[in-house]
Image: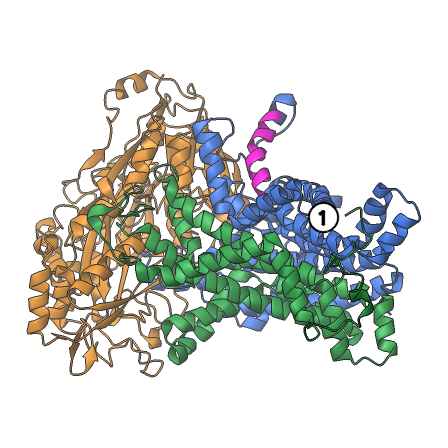
């Protein structure tokens, strides 16, 4: 990092004669997104993160097709077993196969985690940018943020369940209905930190020279936000995204314990971890796997976010 | 009274002898942990078990129920009965006589005025007394002399031991609570947090929902007791942590109600610091069948009401088949271990009231299938039974609790074997057991087909418990969904029999009627499907002697006898 | 700046009144019943009487109005009485908890020390750890230190405290026997030995929480530093010949502090909110334990009062953050 002067590009050794010929672009001009992809591809951490994340998603969504046991199938004779060839992660107190449960739990946890995080991120960035950019909206939106920060989470969730569960169940069927409810519940209760952070950055950003320059050439507000403001607040957003996934996975499990979430025979990583905590001494492997799964997902999302941020930063790109 | 006090390890029966020789306050400190923290030490303002049991160390009733369910005099000279003349022949009054020479912890004398005051305190209509049911039917409490009170009832009371009996109804000091009656009751914080009592300990500091410290009562009636000089009562956390602190780390001496999977407790006991003890009472985990239609397609106000009988569960054969498919032995093994036993009865004890019904104990999947076939439910192409175009699909709800969720999963599997599809739902206990008429998820509202919970009765008489299933006690919109007849069972014959029970004095006859009522709800109709007779498991340190687990009264009923094994 | 602060403080009053109304209505609407923990053996008629005695029979607006009076008029008087020994509040009805029937504020005062020592200390530790880790990780991006830091903070953040807490207890209390598994809230520190006991019982809860806080804050610190390290002004500063230390720790750090200040300001009210799960696991019984217990028991006066105190802190600390923004970056002006 101490060397901040741009490194010489890996210029191809051009033959002296070639230098005289007018350079003919071999390919059509590269789009910005291709550059981003190139940069992203070269980011080792990001690639590793992406691969692991895709592997996890494949494992939890495709894995169950190839695995003989069902997550909710009880085989009472083989309960509390340690790892074996038949049950590589052992079985739980009712003889359910832990690997099958981990995969089934992953489906819920990963989809809830990512969707709820995206929703919270969208709401948070929207409110944050609007509040930071438009002075007139700042007061109102930030007081709204204060209000949401102050509302107690559990009663709020209870009210949402009370008001919307039956309607959503009627409209989308029980599983999709609950999924929508949980994602929305987590989304609308966790956007506030992102909003405050983004707003703080935008406040500082909009006083910088380049914004003034862009404004002086008549850039519209929408274009200004999309082109100049958002890319520059991307890194806190990316951090919020990674932390948001972890948050959403844990919050989902907290909701399930309260009976606000999925039906009790629906495994999720958070619930598997919670249920296994009592058995920590007898069967440590039962806490290990769901704990590892959550950490691995968050970790890979974090590296992915890091790479994405680096790739989208024009100053770093091409370094 | 047949009641098995089951000690997992040796009970210190021998050690009693050494205890007698001990001196008051010679054994240092004893530490108790309850994973629910006491909020108040006045049982008349809160009926939570945690509050009643912590208060039982300080204030005492005239008599308690012993570990075998027998009545034991505490502040009373003896338990009044018809035989000894304490209870009038027409069963309309009971006369209690206090032990002479009793003093409060502040040194003043305990008199019959205190007893009468206690009744007035609870019967004050503005006080919102949590134990008002204990004083139901009391017309007057009269002071006969300094040590004698007479309680009169409006109607004959075959069971006159409501007032002043058991941990729920201790005597409070008139001098202390005089200005705290009626609407002023909740404002007397100091009094409610530090009642003056006759029990073995006095409160030194009370931190609500956290910790209580107590010291030996210098004026306790037995000069050699209690053996401990101080007592710490910590609350909060969860059952696993409480068990760990007694059985594994040895930080505490006594942990209450370890609702944990049996193998978790077994592992903790291996820690070697203490032992788990179990005893049975009247608590029964059961499945309740909804006799009315909870379908969400019905208009609000008609769901789960007598207007619409349940389309599937109204058929007795169906209910019986659902019960037959359940393997209760396995449920016990997985959920409760030594602290549970399979049962088919709503009233499992005391023996005189417990029916001999054991029909349900063996699982019979084939029989259940045959019964459903007979009832016209044919297996459809997807393996789920159907009849007249209707699928056999049930919503099965219960409160959030690890053992209950295991039970749900197991029962769902058995029911799927007989072609019944089950949707499971778990609800936070604070909503489920709350009576909020606005919530769709309360157990009274019962917007589900079947539901599971546990219930018991105070003391040893099941009359009011069995009377919960009369027609008019069904929760309905007009009564703000309050009511105890959860399954909306309605049988005029049952109601008549309940009425007969309330007018019967002979114990023999009462037992007979109670058993009949129990059978009507269980094996004759399968409206209530009992699963497990749930015992209580608590744990105490190896060095704590004198512990006798009692499920009929406060668990700390004999804390005066506890001592340190040296 | 001063006018801005004053103006915001004035606006805070209607905001807070509105928030208190919103909380009140939310709690009113939420399903639940203060009688939920009463055993099923208590008949419904008795429960109905008990509800009435709690004042639940009165209409919503009267109860809200009563609460406002008690919170803004009676409770401050009680505070003055306690400080000065006066008798303003004598005979006036304070906010009473439904669970304990005692004044809510007394219990809050009783719980505050535990929460401030355990949760507050862990937050301070978390911030103190997070800043250098975040700065150094950004400065040496993708170095071994950065990778390890990322790994630990991500695992620390994503593994929930209900598990890490129990894990620590099993290792350090059960197996090794070093620390008590149950926090003694009555413990008094008055000499060296009692201080050692206090430290012993604080180590586990504080480290669980500090790890969690440090993980979060260090990520934001790192990201923000990374953003600024590549800016032109950094190059200028270096070109001017400023030392690396000055460049990084003065110029870059100051400009990177805005998101970090936001995150820290968001976290401070939560310190007073207590750490619900950690307090539960270690039996610290602070404000978090009080709040969750009150929610479970539907103790509305308690929940309302606690949440409102948090709301006041949230509004206050967000204001402080806004003031700090303009100190960190004088270009930020609020009219």
Whether residue B179 sits left or right of residue B134 in the image: it is right
Q: Colour of chain A?
A: green
Location of residue C101 in the rendering, given as x and y in whole percent from the top left corner: 52, 52
Q: Which residues are magenta?
A: C196-209
Q: Nearer the viewer, residue B323 or B441?
A: B323
Quadrant position of the C terminus of chain C in the picture: bottom right
Depicted B236 relative to depicted B429: above or below: above
Q: Residue at x 53, y 43 (%)?
A: C285
- Categorize mark 1 by other alpha carbons within 10 Å: few (<14), some (14-19), many (20+): many
Q: Colour of chain B?
A: orange
Depicted B127 relative to depicted A127: above or below: above
Question: Label 1: which residue?
Answer: C138
The answer, for residue C247, to whether it is visible in the render is: yes
Whether residue B428 sits left or right of residue B512 in the image: it is right
**What is the magenta segment's predominant secondary structure?**
helix
Location of residue B113 in the rendering, given as x and y in whole percent from the top left corner: 39, 43
Task: Quadrant for residue C130, please give it.
Answer: top right
Q: Colour of chain C?
A: blue
Depicted B222 relative to depicted B334: above or below: above
Q: How many marks?
A: 1
Residue A63 is a magenta residue:
no
Secondary structure under the numbered disc 1 in the rendered image: helix
Give me the chain letter of mark 1: C
Q: Nearer the viewer, residue B1 or C241?
A: C241
């Amino acid at each position: 990092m101490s060397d901040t002067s741009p490194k010489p590009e890996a210029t191809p050794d051009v033959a002296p004669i070639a230098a005289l010929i007018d350079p003919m672009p071999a390919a059509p001009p590269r789009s910005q997104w291709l550059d981003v992809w190139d940069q992203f591809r070269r980011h080792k951490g990001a690639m590793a993160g992406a691969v692991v994340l895709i592997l996890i998603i494949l494992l939890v969504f495709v894995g169950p097709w190839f695995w003989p046991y069902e997550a909710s199938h009880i085989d009472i004779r083989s309960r509390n077993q340690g790892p074996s060839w038949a049950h590589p992660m052992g079985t739980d107190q009712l003889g359910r196969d832990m690997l099958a449960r981990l995969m089934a739990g992953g489906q819920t946890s990963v989809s809830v985690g990512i969707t709820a995080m995206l929703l919270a991120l969208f709401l948070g960035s929207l409110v944050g940018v609007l509040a930071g950019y438009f002075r007139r909206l700042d007061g109102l939106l930030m007081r709204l943020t204060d209000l949401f920060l102050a509302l107690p989470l559990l009663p709020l969730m209870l009210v949402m369940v009370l008001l919307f569960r039956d309607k959503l169940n009627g409209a989308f069927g029980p599983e999709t209905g609950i999924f929508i409810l949980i994602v929305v519940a987590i989304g609308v209760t966790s956007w506030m930190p992102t909003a405050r952070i983004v707003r703080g950055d935008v406040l500082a950003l909009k006083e910088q020279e380049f914004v003034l320059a862009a404004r002086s050439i008549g850039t519209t507000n929408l274009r200004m936000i999309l082109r100049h403001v958002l890319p520059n607040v991307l890194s806190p957003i990316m951090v919020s995204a990674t932390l948001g996934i972890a948050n959403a996975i844990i919050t989902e499990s907290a909701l399930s314990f309260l009976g606000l979430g999925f039906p009790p025979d629906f495994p999720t990583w958070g619930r598997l971890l919670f249920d296994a905590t009592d058995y920590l001494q007898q069967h440590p492997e039962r806490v290990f796997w769901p704990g590892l799964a959550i950490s691995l997902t968050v970790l890979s999302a974090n590296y992915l976010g890091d790479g994405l941020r680096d790739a989208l930063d024009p100053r770093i790109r091409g370094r | 009274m047949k009641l098995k006090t089951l000690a997992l390890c040796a009970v210190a029966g021998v050690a009693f002898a050494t205890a007698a020789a001990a001196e008051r306050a010679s054994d240092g400190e004893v530490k108790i942990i309850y994973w629910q923290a006491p909020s108040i030490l006045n049982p008349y303002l809160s009926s939570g078990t945690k509050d009643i049991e912590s208060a039982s160390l300080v204030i005492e009733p005239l008599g308690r129920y012993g570990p075998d369910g027998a009545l034991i005099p505490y502040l009373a000279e003896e338990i009044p009965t018809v035989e000894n003349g304490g209870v009038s022949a027409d069963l309309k009054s009971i006369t209690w006589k206090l032990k002479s020479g009793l003093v409060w912890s502040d040194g003043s004398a305990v008199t019959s005025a205190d007893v009468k005051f206690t009744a007035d305190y609870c019967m004050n209509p503005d006080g919102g007394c949590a134990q008002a049911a204990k004083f139901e039917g009391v017309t007057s409490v009269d002071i006969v002399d300094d040590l004698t009170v007479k309680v009169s009832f409006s109607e004959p009371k075959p069971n006159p031991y409501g007032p002043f009996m058991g941990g729920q109804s201790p005597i409070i000091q008139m001098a202390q609570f005089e200005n705290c009656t009626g609407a002023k009751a909740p404002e007397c914080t100091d009094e409610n947090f530090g009642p003056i009592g006759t029990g073995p300990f006095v409160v030194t500091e009370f931190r609500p929902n956290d910790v209580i410290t107590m010291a030996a009562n210098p004026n306790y009636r037995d000069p050699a007791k209690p053996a401990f000089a101080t007592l710490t009562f910590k609350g909060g956390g969860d059952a696993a942590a409480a068990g760990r602190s007694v059985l594994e780390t040895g930080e505490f001496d006594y942990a209450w109600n370890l609702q944990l999977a049996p193998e978790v407790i077994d592992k903790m006991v291996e820690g070697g610091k203490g032992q788990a003890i179990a005893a049975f009472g009247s608590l029964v985990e059961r499945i309740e069948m909804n006799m009315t239609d909870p379908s969400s397609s019905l208009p609000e106000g008609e769901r789960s009401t007598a207007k619409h009988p349940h389309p599937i569960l109204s058929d007795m054969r169906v209910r019986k088949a659902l019960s037959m498919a359940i393997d209760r032995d396995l449920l016990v093994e997985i959920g409760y271990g030594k602290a549970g036993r399979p049962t088919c009865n709503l009233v499992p004890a005391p023996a005189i009231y417990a029916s001999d019904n054991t029909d349900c104990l063996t699982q019979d999947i084939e029989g259940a299938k045959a019964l459903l076939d007979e009832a016209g439910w044919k297996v459809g192409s997807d393996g789920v039974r159907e009849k007249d175009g209707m699928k056999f699909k049930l919503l099965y709800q219960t409160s959030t609790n690890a053992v209950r969720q295991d039970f749900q999963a197991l029962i769902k599997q058995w029911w799927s074997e007989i072609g019944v599809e089950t949707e499971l739902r778990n609800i936070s206990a604070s909503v489920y057991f709350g009576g909020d008429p606005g919530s769709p998820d309360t157990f009274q509202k019962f917007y589900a087909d079947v539901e599971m919970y546990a219930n018991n009765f105070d003391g040893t008489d099941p009359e009011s418990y069995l009377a919960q299933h009369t027609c008019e006690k069904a929760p309905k919109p007009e009564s703000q969904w309050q009511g105890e007849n959860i399954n909306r069972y309605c049988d005029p014959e049952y109601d008549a029999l309940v009425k007969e029970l309330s007018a019967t004095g002979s114990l023999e006859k009462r037992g007979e009627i109670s058993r009949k009522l129990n059978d009507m709800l269980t094996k004759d109709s399968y409206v209530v499907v009992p699963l497990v007779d749930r015992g209580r498991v608590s744990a105490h340190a190896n060095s704590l002697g004198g512990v006798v687990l009692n499920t009929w009264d406060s668990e700390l009923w004999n804390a005066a006898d506890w001592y340190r094994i040296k | 700046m001063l006018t801005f602060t004053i103006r915001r403080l004035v606006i805070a009053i209607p905001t807070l009144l509105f928030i208190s109304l919103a909380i009140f209505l939310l709690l009113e609407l939420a399903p639940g019943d203060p009688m939920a923990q009463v055993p099923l053996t208590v008949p419904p008629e008795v429960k109905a009487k008990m509800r009435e005695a709690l004042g639940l029979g009165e209409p919503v607006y009267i109860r809200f109005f009563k609460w406002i009076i008690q919170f803004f008029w009676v409770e401050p008087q009680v505070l003055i009485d306690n400080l000065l020994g006066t008798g303003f509040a004598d005979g006036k009805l304070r906010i009473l908890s439904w669970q304990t029937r005692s004044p809510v504020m007394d219990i809050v005062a009783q719980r505050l020390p535990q929460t401030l020592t355990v949760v507050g200390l862990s937050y301070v530790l978390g911030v103190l750890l997070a800043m250098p880790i975040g700065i150094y990780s950004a400065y040496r991006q993708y170095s071994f230190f950065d990778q390890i830091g990322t790994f630990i903070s991500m695992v620390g953040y994503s593994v929930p405290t209900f598990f890490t807490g129990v894990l620590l207890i099993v290792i350090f209390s059960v197996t090794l026997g070093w620390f008590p598994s149950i926090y003694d809230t009555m413990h008094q520190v008055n000499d060296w030995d009692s201080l050692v006991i206090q430290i012993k019982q604080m180590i586990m809860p504080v480290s669980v929480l500090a790890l969690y806080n440090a993980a979060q804050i260090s990520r934001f610190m790192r990201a923000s530093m990374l953003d600024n390290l590549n800016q032109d002004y950094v190059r200028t500063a270096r070109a001017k010949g400023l030392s690396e230390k000055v460049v990084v720790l003065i110029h870059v750090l100051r400009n990177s502090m805005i998101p970090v200040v936001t995150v820290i300001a968001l976290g401070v009210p939560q310190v007073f909110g207590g750490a619900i799960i950690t307090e539960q696991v270690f039996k610290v019984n602070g404000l978090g334990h009080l709040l969750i217990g009150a929610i479970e028991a539907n103790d509305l006066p308690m929940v309302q009062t606690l949440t409102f105190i948090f709301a006041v802190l949230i509004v206050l600390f967000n204001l402080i953050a806004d003031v700090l923004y303009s100190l960190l970056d004088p270009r930020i002006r609020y009219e």
